[in-house]
Image: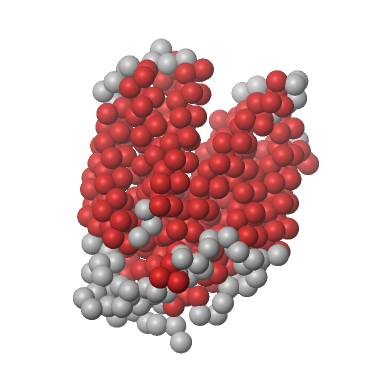
Amino acid sequence: MTPQSNAPPGRLWLPLLAAALALVVVHGIGRFAYTPLLPMLVADGFMGLDAGAAFATWNYVGYLLGAMLAIRLHEPAQIRRILPAALLINAACTVAQGFTDHPTLFLLLRLISGISNGVVFVQAPALVLEWLARHGLAALSGLMYFGVGSGLLLSNALANLPAAWLHGAERWWPMALAAVPLAWWSARQLAHLDRPQAGAPALPAASRATPLLDRASLPVFMAYAGAGLGYILPTTFLPVVAHEQLPAGHWLQSGAWLILALSTLAAAWLWNRLGSRMGDRNALILNYVVQGIGVAGPLLWPGVPGVLACALLVGSTFLGSVLLTQRLARALHPHQGPRISAALITLYGLAQLTGPWMARMWLERGGSMSDTYWLGAGALVWATLWTLRTQQAPAHAGMGLKAVRAD
């Protein structure tokens, strides 16, 4: 029988809200604020396009390193110490970026921001998922990822609304004003989550030592690699494809990214709901099919229909693939929650790095950016086929561990 929560109803939402706000700080602001700010910083003379691309790359490298670090720092006691610190470090980087115009220092800050983002993006959802599972509420876990979509929209507003009054590094000031209080509150909440209960039995060493990769989990990892490669191309290059396929001055050239961002808002609720009703594996298969159609949209229906389909379908699915995969993997290895989450995100981050690199190689050979979307669509076909080979999660997977309790 699924355990029922003995916490007050109001308390049940605090961990979800804390994790969502952590993702707002590190991903919505710490990472994605750079997207709307980049053309402004270039226009201000703060950096050139080449330097801007280098800064973005080092941030992605940092994200990958942070996820790899989280694989080793997966014990609950380690997470309680490192997660709040990483969250506050990320906010501090956002503040510091508002007070430097030195390229080397700015690059270092983007690297550190990426590392702390990787740690938080792994540890915060994994920690709260374990907490929810022990309260019989694992089906709510996808709502944490609402923080990514809302953070993306928040950073877009903070970049554009005060744009006329700020210049250069000052453009990070509104981001800092939002990031610091959100990071402080979220860090305090997460630091007090999952404290060990006195006298509680420790998890058997054999359970902790089970391999991450086995017959059950291998298809999930293989599928997730395809998901990382499939989503990164449209989320990085959709405005470029819109400029290739649409007449000059068309509203979708700037509006496609906003539509994609708005579509993410309902994604966490939608796929969380579908996963609960259909089962996470079946919902994930549907997700990859819909996402693949979205990526292929500009190829199948060039122009307005394809660009619009890509923005709507990719925006409403890519967060769903993250939350469904994380929950499915934990269900297959319930004693490996934070560790398997870190391994999956590391693989996802590595796949993200390969996408733009492969696109650049194609462009150097005279291809168009639109053509690179065949690579993304193919990657999502790969993800679908591997997910079809994934076994259904055990019926008891949502029960979680009994060794710790929440404060």
In terms of depth relative to the viewer, which is nearer, 392 or 373?
A: 392
* Visible residue check, residue 328: yes
Q: Is residue 214 left or right of residue 198?
A: right
* Visible residue check, residue 157: no
| In the rendered image, the vertical position of residue 79 relative to residue 208, given as above or below | above
Residue 224, image x, y percentages: 60, 53
Residue 396, image x, y percentages: 51, 80
Question: Which picture quadrant has residue 140?
Answer: bottom left
| In the rendered image, the vertical position of residue 270 relative to residue 318, given as above or below | below
Say which residue appears at 62% left-offset and 36% top-offset: 355
Residue 287, image x, y percentages: 64, 58
| In the rendered image, the vertical position of residue 32 relative to residue 314, given as above or below | above
Q: Quadrant of the C terminus?
A: bottom left
In terms of depth relative to the viewer, which is nearer, 296 or 101?
A: 101
Colour option used: secondary structure
| In the rendered image, the vertical position of residue 82 relative to residue 43, given as above or below | below
Q: Is residue 368 left or right of residue 316?
A: right
Say which residue appears at 60% left-offset and 64% top-offset: 214
Tag count = 0
Furthest residue in direction bottom, as rendered:
1
Residue 81, image x, y percentages: 26, 53
Furthest residue in direction right, as rendered:
300
Question: Which picture quadrant has residue 208?
Answer: bottom left
Furthest residue in direction top, as rendered:
45
Say which residue appears at 46% left-offset and 66% top-offset: 209
In terms of depth relative to the viewer, which is nearer, 6 or 165?
A: 6
Say which residue appears at 47% left-offset and 18% top-offset: 51
